[in-house]
Amino acid sequence: MSETFRPENAEQLRDVLAWAASESKRLEIVGSGSKRALGRPVMADHSVELGALAGISLYEPDELVLSAGPSTPLTEIETVLAEKKQQLEFEPPDYGPVLAAASGAAGGAPDKPNPQSGTLGGVLACNLSGPRRVKGGAARDHFLGFTAVSGHGTIFKSGGRVVKNVTGYDLSKLMAGSWGTLAVTTGVTIKVLPAPEKRRTVLLFGGDPALGGRALSMAMNSPYDVSAAAWLSASLAAQSPVDLVSAQKASVAAVRIEGFGPSVAYRCKVLREQLGALGPTEELHSANSIRFWREIRDVMPFAGPGDDRLIWRISVPPAAGPGIVTALAGEDGADAFLDWGGGLVWLAVPPGADAREEPVRAAVGRAGGHATLFRAPAELRGRVPVFQPQEAAKAALTARIKAAFDPAGILNPGRMYAEF
Amino acid sequence: MKMPEPDKAVLARRPEIAAALAKIVPGDGGVIVDPDELRPYESDGLTAYRQPPMLAVLPETTEQVCSILRYCHENDIKVVPRGSGTSLSGGALPLADGVLLGMSRFNRILEIDYANRCVIAQPGVTNLGITKAVEHEGFYYAPDPSSQIACSIGGNIAENSGGVHCLKYGLTTNNVLGLELVLIDGEIIRVGGKHLDADGYDLLGVLTGSEGLLGVVTEVTVRILRSPETVRAMLAGFPTNEQAGDCVARIIGAGIIPGGMEMMDRLAIRAAEEFAKAGYPLDVEALLIIELDGPEEEVDDLIDRVARIATDTGASTIRVSESDAEREAFWAGRKAAFPAVGRISPDYYCMDGTIPRRRLPDVLRRIRELSEQYGLRVANVFHAGDGNMHPLILYDANVSGELEKAEAFGAEILKLCVEVGGVLTGEHGVGVEKRDLMPEMFSKEDLDQQQRVKCAFDPASLLNPGKMFPELHRCAELGRVHVHRGKLPFPDIPRF
């Protein structure tokens, strides 16, 4: 019979994992459950809910550091940081609405913080980063240290609470993006940064993906410290809740500038002049800029009610992004937008048994990079490889690393790869 | 420093091994066996430790690296990889029965891709060599360790090198996009590329800073950044360390992350000024160098804000650079701090702990007490923004027992760093130097888990053994699952 364990502290979690390792019981590890629809479906005997391992245990704003239990809601952390004019630089996304949209559930109100937007431990475990990834780095770049219980049923720690630290292997990096398959964190420490005083966005309207790509490239290669650069097809721009974007009935390239007042004003002015050579431009100020980027961050263009298209999340060299859009989107219900200066392609394709895996993987193979089947029914995510298939030597190394942390294979079996 | 006992059987096979490797890397200088020619390899930047290798091999291609490692793996021979040999922790210290694998011939930049803002280089290219290759187009590579003229990008990967600008722009780990790596069994693994966030487990992340224990890097893809339009620096002198520390905290509290923020104490200021004539004030206890970069509008605005904070926290001197030449002069003293200290003392020993920044005044006070106790002077330079300290312990190796005294003093400083919530090493690495201090920071369980990662890459522990871990456990022992069959042993855990 399947049971749900709710350990109240690290020692109880250790006891559960030690027992499971000894008995070969497979466990699903759950924070708030907001990302259950991501990755491959877990094949588990029991589940472990970490809800009790929550709360901020340390926050020192002038040291730029925060420690918390893995189940601390992101909204709680963002609220506490905002009081000190700080933020999570990697701009963690809230995929709740886009993952729920296909099942017909309400899309959520994009302007309001969503209490179901997930936990700190979850966003680190999946290494999810928003548009500021291009400037501020990924979730993994802000993950300084942790304590965890491994699949050996042992409590261990790595890293620390200071940014500059090369003492031993950087296991925080391995934990980030391991989808709970290596160890279960009981406490994490992250780097936080000051929030910008001002934010603005320069928009360029019209043109094909190649022109959009040129605009993003121009901005990213400028000395103006662009904090996000995205491109929306005309059809997706038309659905934007930001009137200045939707009213143009055209594709849009968007470039965000953040920082201190005089600097933001200057950089926007120069960038707008430069992008003006490519087409008509516009500028979004604070509230509209925040709203626009939250849409991009949370993949809201594909979160319309009843949108049941399958979504691929494709990371490629930035200059290759527009070509992928041209090759794979624009026809028969497929659509796409670009984030990360062109390097992140969000591709929606009509539902189908093969999820169009072959053309997607082929395009990624040519460009270099990887593709993740981001939104699909569980049955499809169990059949089509969700993450980029690895060549033999790397797959073998990956399996050895998995075994180094979880030799009995008890943690989130099947979540990343069918082999474990 | 105790290193693994040399294997006599391997030493006896030296001629045969040299011949086998010469087949893999033919031609002059491919394999070095002559004792005089091996001497340059006997130590790295941590010159207190010296040990000539059994022999050195200098491959030119990834295929040769594969063949060398496969041969060593099959013949149970230890391998120590080496870049430029600038490690300050003995990361490239050879082994008497080991092959030194020198990567200096991998010295070409393979591709510069401005559209994707990255450079692909062989690991022997110097850190500065990457910036030099792209600066004419207005780009640069951000991490800038002080050895950047000499240190190799492959070595930077091994050590996760930092530099004065990593407060704002990150360490090596935040600037690497891709690697080609050869495992000890000769397998080639490619990780990442020109795209962001490599797929699968974050191998890039664990390889960066792995000190040559996991594999040999044969190709590196790094991110390059557009150079800022304007860079200006400020010197701010303070009557006390506390005030300087307070100034740093308030700058960050005001939401300003300077490009660089360095601090020096009185002895370091004096030594640097004497050596570099940087124009430092000599009547202060602490000096901050604060660098701001960006568009002119931003830099001017921030210089004003920072100057106000410095004044409010009690700065007795404030100077702002009015030209690039003046800014470089401000830095010249700081960058020359190590050689400058080398002039006022026959030898010095450089430490590298990181502490939570607010503990700085307290830690400096305790270092002063230790300094009196040991009878050795200390000059402090400090990456103030991120809490990374470089106390330089002054000693004379020709005075019997002083090196040991300096080492004991250094160990106490590092224990102090850990005690206040910091770490043993911020950017120099563990190597042999801090290996035996690892248990100060990590429990047996912590170290066991790190070694299990090592086992996943190198189960026979042939790559750079004797570094990082105070004792090596057998992988079979670490991998065992402890079985205690029975009922659920935890009746108290809430279950549903």
Image: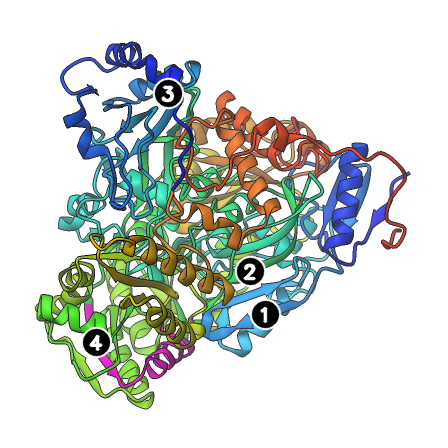
Q: Could you say where residue B426 lies in the image, as x and y percent from the top left?
A: 39, 56
Name the residue at 71% across, 42% down.
A153
10 Å neighbourhood of mark 3: few (<14), some, or many (≥20)?
many
Q: Quadrant of the N terminus of chain B?
A: top left
Q: Amino acid at mark 1?
A: Leu
- Give the residue number, with chain letter if any, for mark 1: A58
Secondary structure of the residue carrying tag 2 is strand
Contact, CB < 8 Å: mark 2 with mark 1?
A: yes
Amino acid on which disc 2 is placed = Thr
In the displayed structure, B416 sits above or below A36; it is: below
Mark 4: give few (<14), some (14-19) or many (20+) Cα within 10 Å.
many
The residue to which callout 2 is attached is A189
Residue type (three-letter) at the residue carrying disc 3: Leu
Q: Earlier in the sequence, mark 4 or mark 3?
A: 3
Q: Quadrant of residue B17?
A: top left
Q: Secondary structure at mark 1?
A: strand
